[in-house]
């Protein structure tokens, strides 16, 4: 499962807000004399058909003129609000674009920063990571440029700027310039045609468009500074969720003496995790269900069952939260692979245990985004993910169904393993490789049942529908936010480091919503491939170790029924039927319930056992079905057939 919890904007927006929502960092002589100024009082006569340089010069003049030539470090104090929660925010940044912020939001506290070279983040649980993937580096460079005084330099600090365009929005005129800093992502800057002040900044992060609107400019010393900003995120389908809105309002600003470089440096992680056994090793058996890892643990001393997911965080259901004695606050949004975005709340717990691995004082994300019973045919209380993987060295031995969590001080890399470096743009590891000769960047997701899912921008860019001639579009997975639809194909060779994985069942996404519509990565590597190995994650060294098991050379099986089934009270409910597939030929329809298969009542076996049978029974096998449509039962035969070839076609 790949989740975007709606809080991610907080960790990439606050520094930009502090820099006037992508304006240069203000210079303050002292922290007094903050005088609100109406826009009309700062009006500067617009120049006819201005150049980008002229627009930037006009902004400089309107907001302080020569005051921008004196470097300063600014400390700002205010309040951040999102999803019905609010709390204090402190931001420090200098004219070079270096920044650090600390925030509180309901039960959580966090920080992020940029030291002039690297961006970093400290999560609510105290987990700290350098954000070093290309997407993260590009975002950091753009945010640093926007927060610096580079736009007032003759060469724009190496950035490339478009010619201004005059636009009207709701009867108001704007001079609009697109700027691309060196090594950064493009940013579109909207300058008020009447005042010359920067009023709006638009950037792209992943597949989303992030818009920050700044206002309430006030005089601080010799400069004008916006004291209020609102940031919204719009997905590729054009949807803007009000639960994701982040609002920042500053109450106090002050110039401070130039701080030591250490202020902006990535901090050490807090010591809130441990292994109970003196050996520093905890072994936890797991069940592998639908290529998902389920393991036993506890929350606040109460037994719990977790899905173990590199793409997730500490998630629990509302029902489980009540049993654990925790109360959620806030109403944010859960974003995953599906189209929907269920509500998300935050709660504090005393302790999470996964076997003998212990996390103290964790933050829990409470949502009903996943109905494990109907989707998986098994029950679970929630997810453990990034916090566990970041704190410990985690080995997932798929063949032995065993998790091994090791204290970092006691860890030794597995002998004879294939080593694949990874980076982080977010919490999930991302790796580089090639697929049939095409360079790919893939997130590594133990919470995905699929083998390989390629994101829709990558599919379109490389014309993969015409290249691979996939099966018709159908439901290929179901996660946070609902079902994911894709076309399945058999691709040839996936190369990761010195390792070649052949005949991968691959989903080609075409949607405009959800995680698989992002252009930040090429796609997502899931359990269907990972289960061929014992996989070890070392988040400090940023290395993934792969030791092949006996199934490493076996091609992925793929469903031969031509339908997607979930658990239902009456047995198995059909949620999707592939056009011209076996289920369609058998006369099955969405909403039908399968009562029995070959005389065996479907309620007698678990959902995932039936899914395995429909995937592994041979093509040509005929199954006798009893099907209920409404209150009417009927009999039919389902003849299994390959939906994709067992091996990739030769080229």
Image (spheres, helix red, strand yellow):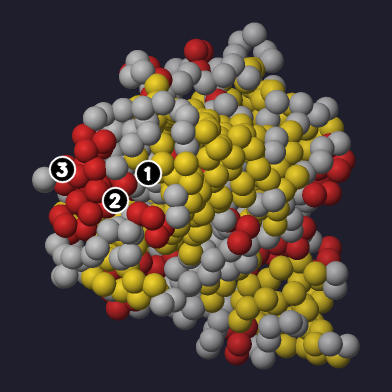
Residue 224, numbered label? 1
- Of all residues, the one furthest to the top in this rendering is 278
Q: In this view, does 363 lie above or below 615?
A: above
Q: Name the residue under label 3.
A: 153
Residue 187 position, x and y percent, is 30, 56
Is residue 574 in sight in this rendering? yes
Q: Do the residues labelled 2 and 1 touch (CB within 8 Å)?
A: yes
Q: Is residue 464 above or below residue 286?
A: below
Q: How many tags in the picture?
A: 3
Q: Quadrant of residue 601?
A: bottom right
Q: Tell me how far mark 3 sits from mark 2, CA to CA.
A: 16 Å
Mark 3 vs mark 2: give the one in front: 2
Q: Is residue 1 above or below residue 513?
A: above
Q: Is mark 3 on a helix, strand or loop?
A: loop
Q: Nearer the viewer, residue 252 or 129?
A: 252
Is residue 101 in sight in this rendering? no
């Amino acid at each position: 499962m790949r989740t975007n919890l709606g809080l991610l904007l907080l960790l990439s927006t606050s520094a930009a807000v502090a820099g006037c929502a992508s304006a240069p960092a203000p210079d303050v002589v002292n922290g007094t004399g903050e005088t609100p100024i109406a826009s009309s009082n700062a009006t500067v006569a617009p120049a006819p058909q201005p150049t980008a340089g002229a627009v930037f010069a006009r902004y400089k003049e309107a907001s302080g003129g020569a005051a921008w030539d004196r470097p300063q470090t600014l400390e700002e104090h205010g309040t951040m609000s999102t999803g019905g929660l609010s709390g204090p925010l402190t931001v420090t940044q200098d004219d070079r674009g270096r920044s650090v912020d600390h925030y509180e939001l309901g039960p959580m506290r966090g920080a992020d920063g940029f030291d002039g070279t690297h961006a970093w983040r400290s999560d609510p649980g105290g987990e700290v990571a350098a954000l070093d993937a290309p997407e993260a580096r590009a975002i950091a460079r753009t945010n640093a440029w926007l927060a610096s005084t580079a736009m007032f330099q003759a060469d724009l600090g190496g950035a490339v700027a478009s010619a201004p365009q005059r636009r009207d929005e709701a009867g108001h005129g704007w001079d609009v310039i697109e700027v691309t800093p060196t090594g950064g992502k493009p940013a579109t800057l909207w300058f008020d045609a009447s005042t010359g002040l920067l009023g709006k900044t638009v950037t792209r992060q992943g597949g989303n468009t992030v818009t920050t609107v700044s206002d309430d400019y006030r005089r601080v010393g010799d400069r004008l500074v916006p004291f209020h900003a609102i940031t919204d995120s719009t997905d590729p389908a054009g949807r803007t969720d009000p639960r994701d809105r982040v609002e920042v309002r500053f109450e106090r600003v002050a110039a401070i003496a130039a701080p030591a470089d250490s202020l902006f440096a990535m901090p050490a992680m807090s010591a809130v995790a441990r292994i109970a056994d003196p050996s520093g090793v905890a072994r936890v058996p797991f069940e592998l269900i639908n290529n998902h890892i389920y393991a036993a643990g506890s929350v606040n001393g109460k037994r719990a069952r977790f899905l173990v997911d590199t793409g997730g965080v500490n998630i629990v259901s509302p029902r489980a939260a009540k049993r654990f004695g925790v109360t959620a606050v806030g109403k944010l949004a859960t974003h995953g692979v599906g189209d929907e975005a269920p509500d998300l709340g935050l709660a504090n717990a005393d302790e999470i245990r996964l076997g003998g691995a212990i996390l103290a004082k964790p933050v829990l994300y409470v949502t009903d985004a996943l109905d494990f019973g109907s989707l998986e045919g098994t029950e679970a209380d929630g997810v453990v993910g990034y916090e566990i993987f970041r704190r410990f060295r985690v080995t997932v031995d798929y063949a032995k169904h065993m998790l091994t969590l090791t204290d970092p001080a006691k860890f030794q890399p597995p002998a004879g393993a294939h080593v694949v470096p990874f980076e982080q743009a977010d919490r999930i590891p991302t790796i580089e490789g090639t697929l049939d000769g095409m360079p790919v960047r893939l997130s590594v997701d133990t919470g995905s049942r699929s083998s390989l899912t390629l994101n829709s921008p990558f599919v379109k860019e490389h014309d993969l529908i015409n290249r691979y001639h996939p099966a018709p579009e159908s439901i290929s997975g179901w996660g946070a936010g609902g079902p994911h639809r894709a076309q399945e194909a058999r691709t040839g060779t996936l190369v990761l480091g010195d390792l070649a994985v052949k005949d991968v069942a691959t989903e080609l996404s075409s949607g405009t919503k959800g995680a698989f519509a992002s252009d930040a990565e090429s796609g997502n590597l899931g359990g269907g491939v990972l289960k061929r190995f014992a996989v070890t994650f070392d988040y400090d060294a940023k290395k993934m170790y792969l030791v092949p098991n006996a199934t490493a050379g076996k091609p992925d099986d793929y469903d031969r029924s031509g339908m997607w089934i979930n658990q239902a009270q009456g047995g198995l409910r059909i949620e999707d039927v592939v056009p011209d597939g076996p289920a369609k030929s058998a006369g099955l329809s969405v909403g039908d319930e399968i009562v029995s298969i070959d005389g065996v009542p479907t309620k007698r076996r678990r959902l995932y056992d039936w899914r395995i049978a429909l995937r592994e029974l041979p093509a040509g096998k005929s199954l006798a079905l009893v099907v209920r449509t409404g209150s009417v039962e009927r009999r039919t035969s389902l003849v299994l057939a390959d939906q994709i070839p067992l091996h990739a076609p030769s080229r």
